[in-house]
């Protein structure tokens, strides 16, 4: 199981020649009845590497200053006034999104022990209800038990999220973690599933991830430091005060994050530590939870690995260093001597990497992203030519079978598979024109059956087309683009188009299905995803070519994709919008500086736009761990100058910009609220146009925005209405 994924930053290029437009033509203009907020300037100079950097809006970083909160509220009021003319469109889109959801819908049931677990959602309720029912040979009971009702727990909270959610091995207890402000620091509770009441055990200040001991009497969890970095693993004995919990492991290196989880076999507690490019794993036998953790293999810079457990009875023969036949083994996913990763096996207790034996050897250009280990099979999730593939390997003899996919553009991923001895693999499949399906693949027969297909009322997939195209980057690299539109949409350059991008952390933006997106497609939009460098769509080298001192490739790739869409008459610059979140928000800020006339409207949500300030402050959440992604501007002059050259905040100029919609979260621990606030404040001071510039800050949520599904739909409808208005 990989460590939690975090997102973050970007780079610059020289201005590119694009078709110029008059400022009055560039975007929809505002006709707001109130004046735009103008933030006060408090001159401040940062000094680094013998140079000064002006930061007139640094004062906005103090959230305890009442003037800061008032400025954010003033921007919210101004945003409401500006968006008033889009309310009818927003409400219409919200109604469409809501109409595509069934009044009551159950998730595909997941079998675990004597139970089937599933979730039930209601179109008029913001959160889900977790349920279970008995399952087993001869059992035909339809009696359901409520495991957890999130709607009941959320009463009285503006924000509510369940983080960790783990059933104990004996199925009598549930460990679940709650966040009620969006700050991603949780409180752990233990529920007795026989009485539906919480125990007295309450553990504050948790991060993601919990793991049960085999006897269901102990639970392991992670705690964050002041920078919200998970760095400790603790053990709690059920029925005892949390003050008596035992510290099991602590990671002193601030660039490493800690996670804890169970092997699928349930035989081991696994403690993973990882930076952006280095990782290691420790293990504790689950039946002896008081044991000290042991290291699988020594940490080596630049080497990543993760493990899961293979029981000896069904494993290929591996000898231990003492010459005795191996008993249990590790399945190991690693990049050791394998740029695009390989899967190996090794005897437990044998930490010498040279003795690891390949089960799925390295194949250049085929990036193995994940492995799912079962009693008799290992399932490899791998990416080739920009698309995900699933390969099933029988451990006993290495026999392989690929699971076939029906569409040319799609997304596929393994699902919830808690049973180690399962004879089937649960996986999910979707495409831009295919609503999500849950399927079971039978390991022995090779057959696939649909367990559940998401029903979208009123949707007819035959009305839409999905394509894969390729744009040429500045250096000739071919950049994949996923494109979807309605068959009736004219491809003569007149259609509005929304281009989405991310391009960081080796994260792949999948060509998945979105019911909300249909509201754009049905209005004649083309929707496209730019699979740019910095992401992982084309393998590890694709990621390497878009980070650190090659980050500019991310931005120029995106601009090349925009130019391709125009040159091929999918749209024109006058009708092209762009959207990105978090690190994708940095992308939006960078391309708006580099090619402002290439886009008519941009949405940058929780955007990482003041990257130099954040990466220069190691006390902020995530900063130290991000240096391997973006560079360290404190220690390296080259990193500082390169980052400064593309920083959206530091490169705002006095020229016409597209219409820009900006969203922030006051409690966001990943991208501080003040980054988008400072960016917008500087735009207001320097911009020479009257195009829409909107900052909307959620005052009670974090990085993911509103937590309830209706609030999330409403926020999405507002963004889509912005594009409909701006690109009309």
Image (tube, rainbow, N blue to C red):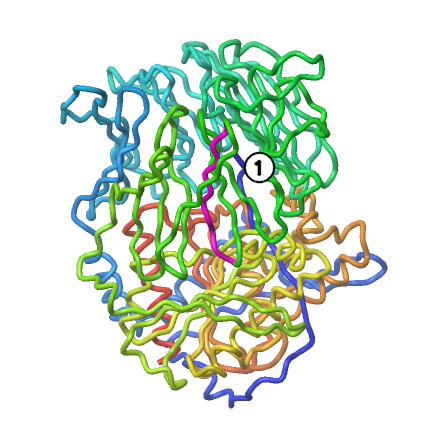
Residue 179's x, y, as percent?
A: 42, 36
Q: Is residue 705 above or below residue 379?
A: below
Q: Where is residue 726 in the image (x, y as percent from the top left)?
A: 39, 77
| Residue shown at 60% from the left, 25% from the top | 232
520 sits to left or right of 697: left
Residue visible at 60% across and 17% down in the picture = 248
Name the residue: 40% across, 61% down.
408
The residue range painted magenta reads 386-395
Residue 138 part of the magenta segment? no
Total numbered circles:
1
Q: Is residue 392 magenta?
A: yes
Residue 417 percent coordinates (x, y): 38, 32
Image-based side of 555 in relation to 482, left or right = right
Question: What kind of element bears circle 1?
Answer: loop
| The C terminus - image quarter | bottom left
> Where residue 129 appears, x then y in whole percent?
25, 35
- Few, some or many residues within 10 Å of mark 1 (<14, 14–19, 20+): many
Reply above or below: 133 against 699. above
Q: Quadrant of residue 694?
A: bottom left
Q: Name the residue under label 1.
A: 228
Q: Is residue 70 visible?
A: no
Asked whether residue 173 appears in the rendered view, the answer is yes
Majority SS type along the magenta span = strand
């Amino acid at each position: 199981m990989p460590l939690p994924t975090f997102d973050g930053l970007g780079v610059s290029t020289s201005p590119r020649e694009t078709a110029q437009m008059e400022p009055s033509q560039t975007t929809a203009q505002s006709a707001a009845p109130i004046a735009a907020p103008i933030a006060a300037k408090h001159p401040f100079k940062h000094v680094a590497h013998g140079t000064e950097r002006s930061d007139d809006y640094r004062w906005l970083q103090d959230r305890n200053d009442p003037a800061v909160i008032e400025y954010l509220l003033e921007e919210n009021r101004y945003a409401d006034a500006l968006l008033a003319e889009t309310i009818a469109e927003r409400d219409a889109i919200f109604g469409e999104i809501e109409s595509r959801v069934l009044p009551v819908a159950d998730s595909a049931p997941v079998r675990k022990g004597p139970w089937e677990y599933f979730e039930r959602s209601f179109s008029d309720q913001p959160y889900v209800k977790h349920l279970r029912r008995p399952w087993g040979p001869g059992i035909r009971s339809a009696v359901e038990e409520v495991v957890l009702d999130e709607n009941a727990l959320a009463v009285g909270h503006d924000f509510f999220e369940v983080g960790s959610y783990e059933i104990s091995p004996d199925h009598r207890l549930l460990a679940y973690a709650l966040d009620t402000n969006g700050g991603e620091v949780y409180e752990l509770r233990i529920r007795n599933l026989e009485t539906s009441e919480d125990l007295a055990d309450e553990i504050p200040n948790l991060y993601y991830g919990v793991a049960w001991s085999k006897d269901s009497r102990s639970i392991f969890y992670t705690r964050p430091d002041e920078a919200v970095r998970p760095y400790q693993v603790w053990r709690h004995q059920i029925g005892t005060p949390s003050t008596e919990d035992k510290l099991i492991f602590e990671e002193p290196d601030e660039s490493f994050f800690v996670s804890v989880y169970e092997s699928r076999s349930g035989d081991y507690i696994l403690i993973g530590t990882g930076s952006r490019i280095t990782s290691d794993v420790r293990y504790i036998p689950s039946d002896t939870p008081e044991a000290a953790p042991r290291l699988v293999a020594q940490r080596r810079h630049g080497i990543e690995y993760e493990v899961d457990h293979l029981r000896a009875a069904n494993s290929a023969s591996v000898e231990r260093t003492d010459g005795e036949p191996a008993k249990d083994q590790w399945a190991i996913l690693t990049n050791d001597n394998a740029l695009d990763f390989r899967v190996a096996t090794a005897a437990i207790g044998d930490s010498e990497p040279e003795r690891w034996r390949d089960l799925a050897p390295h194949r250049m250009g085929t990036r193995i992203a994940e492995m799912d280990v079962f009693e008799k099979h290992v399932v490899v999730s791998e990416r080739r030519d920009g698309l995900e593939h699933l390969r099933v390997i029988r451990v006993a003899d290495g026999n392989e079978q690929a699971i076939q996919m029906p569409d040319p553009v799609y997304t596929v991923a393994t699902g919830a598979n808690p049973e180690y001895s399962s004879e089937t693999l649960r996986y999910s499949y979707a495409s831009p024109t295919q609503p999500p399906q849950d399927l079971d693949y039978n390991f022995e027969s090779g057959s696939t059956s649909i367990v559940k297909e998401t029903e979208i009322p009123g949707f007819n997939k035959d009305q839409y087309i999905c394509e894969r195209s390729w744009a040429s980057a500045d250096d000739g690299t071919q950049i994949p683009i996923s494109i979807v539109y309605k068959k009736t949409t004219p491809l003569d350059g007149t259609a509005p188009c929304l281009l989405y991008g991310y391009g960081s952390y080796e994260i792949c933006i999948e060509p998945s299905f979105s019911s909300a997106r249909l509201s754009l497609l049905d209005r004649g939009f083309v929707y496209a995803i730019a699979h740019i460098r910095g992401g992982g769509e084309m393998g590890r080298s694709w990621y390497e070519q878009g980070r650190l001192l090659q980050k500019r490739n991310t931005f120029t790739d995106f601009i090349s994709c925009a130019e391709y869409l125009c040159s091929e008459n999918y749209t024109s610059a006058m009708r092209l919008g762009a959207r990105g979140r978090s690190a994708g928000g940095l992308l939006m800020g960078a391309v708006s500086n580099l090619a402002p006339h290439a886009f008519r409207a941009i949405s940058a949500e929780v955007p990482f736009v003041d990257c130099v300030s954040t990466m220069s402050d190691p006390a902020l959440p995530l900063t130290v761990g991000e240096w391997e992604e973006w560079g360290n501007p404190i220690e390296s002059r080259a990193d500082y100058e390169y980052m400064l050259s593309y920083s959206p905040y530091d490169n705002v100029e006095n020229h016409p910009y597209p219409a820009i919609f900006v969203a922030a979260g006051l409690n966001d621990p990943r991208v501080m609220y003040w980054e988008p606030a400072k960016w917008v404040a500087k735009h207001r001071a320097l911009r020479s146009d009257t195009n829409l510039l909107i900052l909307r800050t959620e005052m009670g949520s974090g990085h993911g925005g509103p937590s309830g599904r209706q609030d999330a739909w409403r926020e999405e409808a507002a963004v889509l209405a912005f594009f409909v208005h701006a690109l009309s």
